Image: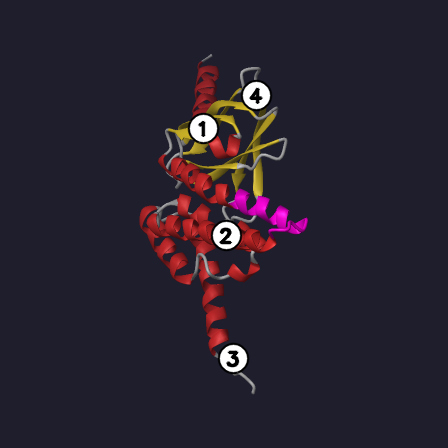
Amino acid sequence: MKRFILAAVAIALVLTSCGEGAVNTTIEGRFVGDRVDSIFLERVADGYDAIERVDATVADVNGEFKFAFKVEEGISPRLYRLSFNNAIRPITLVVAAGDNIYLDSAGDIFLNYQVQNSEESKLIEQFNKEYYSLVDRLARLSEQIAVGDKNIDRLTLEAYTAAKQAMQAQVRFVGSNQSTLAAFYASRQGVVEEYVPMLQGMGVTLPHLQALKQGIEERYPDSPYIEVLEREIAAAEAYVELAGNVVELS
């Protein structure tokens, strides 16, 4: 009997240790307006080169949903996404162990969503609204230009202006939030360049990435996204050096 009790205690200790350091974390909310059935919780890979599916759920008749999962305590925050079963853009969140993040939205979910209980996720929300409102305007103008609207000169100027404003909003946000993962997320958004290739290289540049890396190192010294920035900075520096060695032939 004594051996049985000791064995039971040992098993209990093993089970306890397996969960040690993992903290309950929740993301929940309510989305109404746009039709949303399935909602997927995804984790952005540490190398920012893949998306890992964590869980999936179905919003109830009131549009409410909830994800409950474990996050290792003590690690730096990570980027997660809520994605959907239709054309709605994914919503990116900065998640730390023990967070209880709440979202709600009505109508256009992506442009109208609001976040509570996560400072950096709130920053991403603010960036998305400014940047992607301009991107959507640029997309509408591009469609009008593509069909040969008679006011093509005016539309082209408006499209270029919207593109520049979006790029300026991105640079301003990254520069104002250099120690945040929200700025890291914002620096990755290159939608404008897809519409207006001539603006390539006029947005977030090498000095912005260097300042962002330094800021994140100070705030989250063990963040895996530092290595992502290091690779990008090394590639950018190599390109600058190569460009400096190019000799023009007359």
Q: Is residue 204 rendered to the left or right of residue 33?
A: left
Q: Amino acid at mark 4?
A: Ala
Q: Which residue is mark 3?
A: 246
Range of magenta residues: 135-151
Q: Which residue is mark 4?
A: 59
Where residue 12 appears, as percent x and y from the top left, is: 45, 21
Q: Is residue 177 rendered to the left or right of residue 55?
A: left
CA gap between label 1 and label 3 equals: 57 Å
Viewer-side label of 1, 2: 2
Magenta highlight on residue 143:
yes
Where residue 135 appears, as percent x and y from the top left, is: 52, 45
Secondary-structure class at tag 2: helix
Q: Which residue is mark 1?
A: 19
Give the mark, 2 or 3, whose residue is nearer the N terminus: 2
CA gap between label 1 and label 2 equals: 48 Å
Viewer-side label of 1, 3: 3
Q: Amino acid at mark 3?
A: Val
Give the mark, 4 or 1, whose residue is nearer the N terminus: 1
Give the residue at x 56% y 37%: 89
Secondary-structure class at tag 4: loop
Query: Is label 3 in contact with label 4 (beta carbons under 8 Å)?
Result: no
Query: In the image, is residue 1 above or below residue 23?
Result: above
Give the mark, 4 or 2, whose residue is nearer the N terminus: 4
Secondary-structure class at tag 3: loop
CA gap between label 4 and label 2 equals: 35 Å
Outermost bottom residue: 250
